[in-house]
Image: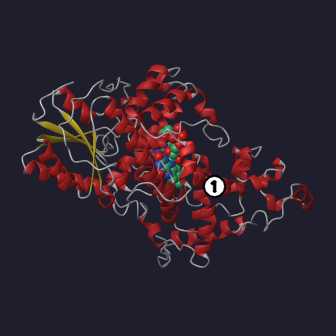
Amino acid sequence: MRTPTDSPTTLIWLRRDLRLADNPALALALAHGERPLVLYIHAPEEEAPWAPGAASRWWLHQSLASLEQRLRALGGQLILAAGDSLAMLRATAKATNATAVYWNRLYDPALVARDSRIKQALRGGGLRCESLKAQVLFEPWELATGAGQPYRVFSAFWRKAAPRLDGAPPQPSPIALPAPPPGIPSLPLAALGLLPRHPWAAGLGQAWHPGEPGAQALLDAFLGNAEHYGEQRDLPAVSGTSRLAPHLHFGEISPRQVIAALAAEAPGGLTGAAEPFVRELGWREFAHHLLYHYPYTPQEPLDPRFAAFPWRTDGAEALLAAWQAGRTGIPLVDAGMRELWQTGWMHNRVRMVVAALLTKQMRLPWQAGARWFWDTLVDADLAANTLGWQWSAGCGADAAPYFRIFNPVRQGERFDPQGDYVRRWCPELAALPAPWIHSPWAAPDATLHRAGLRLGRDYPAPVVDLVQGRAEALAAWEQLKGGSPVQATRPAFD
Ligand SMILES: Cc1cc2nc3c(=O)[nH]c(=O)nc-3n(C[C@H](O)[C@H](O)[C@H](O)COP(=O)(O)OP(=O)(O)OC[C@H]3O[C@@H](n4cnc5c(N)ncnc54)[C@H](O)[C@@H]3O)c2cc1C
């Protein structure tokens, strides 16, 4: 596709919509016959205090590399910049003779504020600006209770949302893009400094293929198994979930594309065997709804009583370190934390178990767990992570009540009955027979001996007593519920 090099352009400001198919901002420019130029600005400080963590930065590097390649193949270019977003947009608009800037909306509180400030400023400077819906199926303001309030209960939210899903076909990727004007200033990808120096990233590279083609391949693979999702989704030893979360977070695939593919290809469409999966996408929507309407929740509990929760203070640092390192002595928890460290992902059932141990038996603040996930998950997402942690800690919307305390041994016996998941991530326990795999401390000495295992040497003894930890957590809850004047005692881990 050829256009005169000095004809006006439209900047497509990509952020977490790193795809060419079903990209409303790009599609709008093409539909208007405009000349789109794709720009990515690296400005992590504008996301503070939730600038992308180390695993997210690794992903972002790979995803931008993939996008750069795809754009070049279509005749376009990815313009890379770093620094103040408004200044970069203005400078690039000037250098490229742009008359308009389009982008797809994000809902993290810091970005909502930044984007509306930028829209005003650009419009004030005479540029046309449009922001569009792409990251979610429903804008947070599209759905409200009968009283016009935001939802706080998932089932009611989903009753309203699910019938509105239409499975309409998404926009395909353009097959060619107009050539960019020559000499546009752009940084090399390496200059963004996204890659960690830590050798840990090698494990991420083995586990994932960031970018639009990788996302599409995972979706295609999942469609063949979607009807079994309901039976398999809680079994961490089985690959029964889609693993689409990081691709959805970075917008390499849109929720609309996923819904449309399920509507067309899953047996029974959206309400058939794939319904439990569609519902999980509903939780993703609910998470965005909550974050938009309660923007303080990444830091503060939605249930204000929990601001005064008597978290543990003695030995808190050591317990947190054991949890982070996957050395708590509780096998299902350690397996999950090691899976996280090695692959940047953890199975959802195990996320719930590790979060429950941290916030209940260990009585450490959910914010400390959320921070660790933020840095280590490739799918770290402010909306979903906040919801997941507040749900687990019992202080969020529709949360598990605090007094309902998961027993990680029972959870292991139920969802990893043969211990295959634990054996994969805690190889030092591999020879333990199934009846003891989730509670090695209860195994007879002879069994431990036969398995070549000495607790405290080859594998830690539990760092917290599950029975006593549970009792202490319940006592803390009673104290909070009774409204006795407890001091807020959150240790500063951040
Ligand atoms: C403590 C805790 C922290 C979490 N942090 C995150 C996070 O930072 N980012 C994140 O994407 N998910 C988070 N989750 C939710 C969930 O664990 C992951 O979305 C899921 O494990 C990702 O794997 P998958 O893509 O194979 O999921 P699938 O089971 O295949 O689900 C499909 C998609 O639905 C969405 N989804 C599924 N479950 C949830 C949920 N409970 N809340 C919101 N969206 C959901 C995700 O986009 C996911 O990709 C967290 C859960 C807990 C308990």
Specify how the rendered protein is coloured: secondary structure
Q: Residue at x 41, y 64 (%)?
A: 299
- Marks counted in the figure total 1
- For label 1, count other residues whose C-alpha is less than 10 Å away and answer few (under 14), some (14-19) or many (20+): many
Q: 422 above or below 253? A: below
Q: 366 above or below 335? A: below
Question: Residue 359 or 480: which is nearer the viewer?
Answer: 359
Q: Judge left or right: residue 36 versus residue 357.
A: left
Instruction: State the image coordinates of residue 147 (x, y, percent, origin top left).
Output: 30, 46
Question: Residue 181 or 94: which is nearer the viewer?
Answer: 181
Instruction: State the image coordinates of residue 131 (x, y, percent, origin top left).
Output: 22, 42
Q: Residue at x 86, y 55 (%)?
A: 451
Question: Residue 49 or 312: which is nearer the viewer?
Answer: 49
Q: 397 above or below 486? A: above
Describe the element under mark 1 as helix, strand or loop.
helix
**Can residue 352 be seen at all in this image of the molecule?**
no
Q: Residue at x 59, y 74 (%)?
A: 316
Instruction: State the image coordinates of residue 481 (x, y, percent, origin top left).
Output: 52, 68
Amino acid type indicated by mark 1: Arg
**Can residue 128 be seen at all in this image of the molecule?**
yes
Q: Farthest front residue? A: 183
Quarter holding residue 49: bottom left
Instruction: State the image coordinates of residue 460 (x, y, percent, origin top left).
Output: 74, 65
Q: Residue at x 48, y 79 (%)?
A: 487
Which quadrant of the rendered structure holds the N terminus?
top left
Q: Judge left or right: residue 193 versus residue 492.
A: left
Which residue bears the numbered disc 1?
338
On whether ligand 1 comes within 8 Å of the CB at mark 1, the answer is: no
Q: Judge left or right: residue 90 versus residue 15.
A: left
